[in-house]
């Protein structure tokens, strides 16, 4: 089945207007020996057959809304998404539009992004936001690009805390491999118990950017104000990778003095979707706007004097600056930025505070109950939000296998990334986890350890 | 006409969706110094939100609403079934770090997608990780760099890029500190072979070529181009933005390309979403396969008669690393594109390109008498004409805006840079002859208006909810947010 609306009669009439005899004759510029390869692909399915095939694939997974109860986070979180979000972004007017290059007929997309930018500024306590990046990891990598551009390549070091998400640190290394840049601070033997100020000796006049996570990869909430002040004293910029749900409760990175705040937007009304697409938010201070990558929507007026919106400062971007652009990025995550705007608007101030508080309360209940089990302990004593690291007397894989048998998706095995944290599990608890589920989780762990 | 912002609609105490009370004992929040004071988010009811965004949606032009011939963007119809399949609970609600045994459906889909894209493009291996076309390009250029470095060939710093290329090509090379050498086009719109020959030496990383190029023309000397670049030890990058012209027509891998990104949001009907998310898998030849980003999906244990194979993740030997967190744009990208390919099969895919190319040539034939087409031969899925009319000072931008009054989205304008007043028109295969005729008629009528009443065209659009925007003011005043944050220094 195809979506081609042309009848054979119309096709023939069109071929005649073009002046060729057949469809094949349109392709004579293609070298004959490679022309019209036979593709070895399965034959076409009808819509009915495709619907059934895809249903079968989807249902052969075990999902976390019915099949499994999840305590897995580590960068993506199982949150409730109000129905209204999907209804709005399912409007063809939004999802079948392109990048709003023609503002006269794209005000829906443009105002939606403008509101998204405003909401993200409010949430992070920063001065401006762009229209989003691919995800939290690539937004963090783009923060390095920004800092590098601010210092015109003269500062060649990035200090990254070992408690930044391991995949973010990997992505930063991938992005910077052509930049003759040193990434320091996250060595395998780093002291994970230390306060954030442990990074201070590494920050010097050659440091372009310091990157920390908030709450950090282990869920801990630190006030980075002192670290940021010290980094600024050396002239370096500081990027905070933040969880947006946590920002409903905790002091904003903006209030701590951060120069850039980025993060994974998935908790703001987006499905986990086996890892994506989601969005990466990127907020910063006004003085860095010209060095920032990504799309940006600004307010203006139209020829009739109406308030309206356009893509602005486009001269920063690749289609104008070409090889001199800060980044090659040309998309944003438009539709998902809209989804996040709808989510934040619908649940609003009260709703987001409720979600954050539920996460906090339930995570703390789970942590308290787990640490009552003999041989089980919390790794860290600092305040945490909705994720915490817990130490077991047995391998995490063994515990997770048992949990799975009881329909529970256990936490993340920290030993994969941190040799010092063998037998340590990162447990995530959100508003989706009921007390009964937490109790069951604790019961099964008890059973495994007894 | 202006709709207030969601912040303007806020009224203290109003609530939308609320959440249950905690069902666990109370735990105190940490010390107040660690908490925020205020959360300045809007306070609105659900109905306020729905009416607000409904109102905004009506200001948008979309493929569902009409013809969107935006060149190089492949604004084809987005089948509705894809919206349903990508939202099946098994896809929506799976976590990227779940044990592989619990997500075999996802992994099978990804594995088959890799195989299908290999078959369609003629490449040896495919990564699904890149998030968009430009991200795929960056990934490709990283691999080209890694390939030369692994062979100890450190002096290669020069990337050859035709003058017709998308801006992302030089920007991707620039991100890796490479020197960009621009190769001009010849009179037929092909790569100028003499100019290319002059640049081919042992400092060449490779060439980034879009074929068909942004004039919509298939390079008639493609074999010679590939040979020249190969002979000096360079690699061939294919920009897959224009793949909609090539499905079942020719495979870039067969032509000798080493690496190419796919734009699933163009060729394979993933909706553009007002600017994203896209999805940009990358295919590579045997030479680059070991450098692909990690992880890829592979078969960990072969299946037997009644037992399916076990799919899981594998890491290529010399991987450039990870391009982003997790596994790429799975739900919104891969599932939609998978559904689309499954419903087309080999013949359906070939028809996509057949009709995309027929539609472009038909429109070119209808417009040839009125507008100048500077590189005029049989085009592929798009063509570029000059958006100006003899005896009138009306410009391509004016013609674009006037098209809105006829309820069409304008073509891409002022690109590629090598055509004066360029209008780049890509109709795609999903438009019928009537639509194409109405569009051609409108352009011919506008050409007449440009001479008879140029002001009518220069002040267009007239019938849209908004008129032309003051873009200078937007850049000068830089209002990027509905409200001014506390302590905000507007003089900065």
Image (tube, coloured by chain):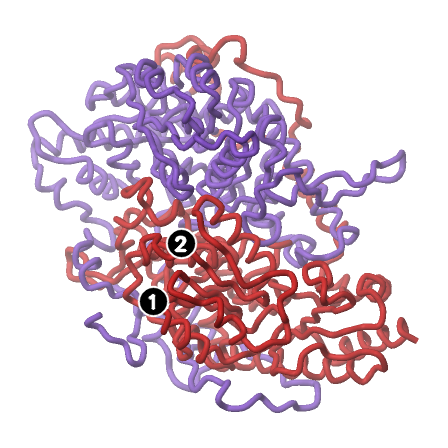
Query: Which residue is depicted at the point 26% across and 55% down?
Result: A312
Figure colour of chain B: purple
Disc 2: which residue:
A145
Q: Nearer the viewer, residue B442 or B106?
A: B106
Question: Chain under label 2?
Answer: A
Disc 1: which residue:
A128
Look at the image and tell me whether residue A347 can be seen.
yes
Residue A319 horizontal side relative to residue B40, left or right:
left
| Chain letter, colour red in render | A
Residue B64 horizontal side relative to residue B400, left or right:
right
Query: Which residue is depicted at the point 48% across and 12% down?
Result: A24
Residue B487 to residue A2: above or below: below
Q: Residues within 10 Å of mark 2 (few under 14, many from 20)?
A: many
Residue B63 image point, x, y percent: 41, 43
- Badge 2 and badge 1 both on one subunit: yes
Say what secondary structure mark 1 lies in: strand
Residue B354 image point, x, y percent: 48, 21
Residue A331 image point, x, y percent: 41, 48
Residue A61 to residue B167: above or below: below
Query: Which residue is depicted at the point 58% across and 46% down?
Result: B321
Mark 2 or mark 1: which is in front? 2
Q: Nearer the viewer, residue A370 or B378?
A: A370
- Quarter holding the N terminus of chain A? top right
Say what secondary structure mark 2 lies in: helix
Residue B126 image point, x, y percent: 61, 34
Q: Residues within 10 Å of mark 1 (few under 14, many from 20)?
A: many
Query: Which residue is depicted at the point 60% across and 78% down?
Result: A385
């Amino acid at each position: 089945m195809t979506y081609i609306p042309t009848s054979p009669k119309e096709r023939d009439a069109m071929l005649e207007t073009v002046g060729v005899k057949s469809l094949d004759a349109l392709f004579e510029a293609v070298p004959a020996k490679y022309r019209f390869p036979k593709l070895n692909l399965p034959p076409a399915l009808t819509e009915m057959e495709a619907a059934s095939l895809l249903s079968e694939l989807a249902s052969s997974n075990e999902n976390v809304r019915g099949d499994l109860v999840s305590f897995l986070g580590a960068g993506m979180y199982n949150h409730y998404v109000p129905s209204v979000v999907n209804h709005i972004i399912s409007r063809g007017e939004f999802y079948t539009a392109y990048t709003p290059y023609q503002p006269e007929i794209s005000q829906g997309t443009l105002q939606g992004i403008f509101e998204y930018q405003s909401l993200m500024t409010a949430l992070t306590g920063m001065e401006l936001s762009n229209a989003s990046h691919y995800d939290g990891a690539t937004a963090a990598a783009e923060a390095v690009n920004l800092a590098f551009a601010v210092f015109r390549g003269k500062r060649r070091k990035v200090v990254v805390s070992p408690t930044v998400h391991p995949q973010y640190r990997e992505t930063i290394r991938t992005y910077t491999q052509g930049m003759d840049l040193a990434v320091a601070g996250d060595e395998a033997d780093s002291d994970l118990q230390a306060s954030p100020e442990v990074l201070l000796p590494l920050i010097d006049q050659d440091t372009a950017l310091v990157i920390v996570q908030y709450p950090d990869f282990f869920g801990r909430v630190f006030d980075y104000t002192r670290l940021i002040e010290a980094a600024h004293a050396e002239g370096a910029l500081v990027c905070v990778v933040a969880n947006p749900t946590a920002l409903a409760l905790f002091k904003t990175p903006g209030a701590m003095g951060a120069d850039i705040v980025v993060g994974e937007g998935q908790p703001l009304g987006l499905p986990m979707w086996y890892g994506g697409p989601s969005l990466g938010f990127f907020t910063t201070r006004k003085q860095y706007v010209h060095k920032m990558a990504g799309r940006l929507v600004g307010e203006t007026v139209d020829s009739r004097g109406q308030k309206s919106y356009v893509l602005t400062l486009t001269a920063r971007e690749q289609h104008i600056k070409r090889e001199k652009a800060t980044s090659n990025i040309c998309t944003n995550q438009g539709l998902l930025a809209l989804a996040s705007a709808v989510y934040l608007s619908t649940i609003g101030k009260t709703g987001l505070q409720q979600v954050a508080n539920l996460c906090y309360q339930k995570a703390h209940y789970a942590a308290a109950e787990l640490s009552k089990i003999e041989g089980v302990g919390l790794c860290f004593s600092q305040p945490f939000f909705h994720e915490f690291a817990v130490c077991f007397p047995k391998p995490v894989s063994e515990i997770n296998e048992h949990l799975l048998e009881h329909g529970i998706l256990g936490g993340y095995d920290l030993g994969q990334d941190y040799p010092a944290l063998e037998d340590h599990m990162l447990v995530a608890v959100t508003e989706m986890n009921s007390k009964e589920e937490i109790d069951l989780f604790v019961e099964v762990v008890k059973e495994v350890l007894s | 006409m202006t709709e207030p912002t969601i912040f303007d609609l806020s009224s203290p105490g109003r609530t939308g969706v609320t959440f249950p009370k905690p069902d666990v004992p109370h735990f105190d929040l940490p010390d107040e110094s660690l908490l925020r004071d205020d959360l300045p988010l809007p306070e609105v009811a659900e109905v306020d939100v729905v009416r607000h965004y409904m109102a905004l949606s009506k200001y948008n032009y979309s493929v569902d609403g009409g013809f969107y011939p935006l060149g190089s963007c492949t604004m084809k119809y987005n089948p509705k079934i894809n919206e349903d399949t990508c939202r099946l609970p098994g896809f929506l609600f799976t976590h990227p770090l779940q044990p592989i045994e619990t997500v075999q459906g996802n992994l099978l889909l990804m594995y088959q997608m890799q195989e299908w894209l290999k078959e369609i493009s003629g490449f040896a291996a495919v990564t699904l990780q890149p998030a968009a076309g430009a991200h795929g390009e960056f990934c490709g250029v990283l691999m080209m760099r890694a390939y030369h470095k692994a062979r100890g060939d450190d002096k290669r710093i020069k990337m050859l890029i035709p003058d017709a290329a998308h801006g992302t090509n030089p920007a991707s090379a620039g991100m890796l500190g490479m020197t960009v050498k621009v190769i001009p086009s010849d009179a037929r719109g092909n790569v100028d072979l003499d100019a290319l020959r002059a640049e081919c030496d042992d400092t060449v990383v490779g060439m980034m070529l879009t074929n068909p190029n942004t004039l919509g023309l298939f390079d008639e000397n493609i074999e010679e181009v590939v040979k020249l670049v190969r002979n000096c030890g360079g690699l061939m990058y294919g920009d897959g933005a224009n793949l909609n012209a090539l499905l079942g027509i020719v495979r870039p891998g067969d032509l000798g390309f080493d690496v190419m990104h796919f734009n699933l949001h163009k060729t394979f009907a993933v909706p553009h979403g007002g600017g994203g998310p896209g999805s940009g898998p990358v295919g590579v030849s045997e030479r680059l396969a070991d450098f692909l980003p990690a992880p890829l999906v592979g078969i960990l244990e072969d299946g037997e008669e009644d037992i399916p194979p076990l799919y899981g993740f594998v890491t290529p030997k010399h991987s450039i690393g990870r391009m982003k967190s997790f596994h790429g744009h799975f739900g919104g990208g891969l599932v939609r594109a998978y559904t689309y390919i499954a419903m087309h099969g080999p013949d359906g895919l070939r028809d996509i390109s057949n009709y995309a190319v027929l539609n472009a040539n038909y429109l070119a034939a209808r417009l040839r008498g009125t507008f100048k087409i500077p590189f005029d031969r049989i085009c592929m899925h798009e063509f570029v004409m000059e958006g100006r009319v003899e005896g009138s000072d009306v410009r391509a931008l004016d013609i674009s805006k006037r098209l809105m009054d006829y309820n069409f989205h304008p073509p891409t304008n002022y690109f590629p840079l090598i055509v004066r007043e360029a209008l780049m028109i890509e109709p795609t295969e999903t438009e019928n002859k009537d639509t194409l005729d109405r569009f051609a008629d409108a352009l011919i009528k506008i050409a007449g208006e440009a001479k008879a009443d140029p002001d009518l065209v220069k002040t267009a659009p007239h019938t849209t909810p908004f008129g032309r925007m003051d873009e200078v003011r937007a850049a000068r005043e830089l209002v990027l947010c509905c409200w001014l944050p506390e302590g905000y220094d507007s003089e900065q």
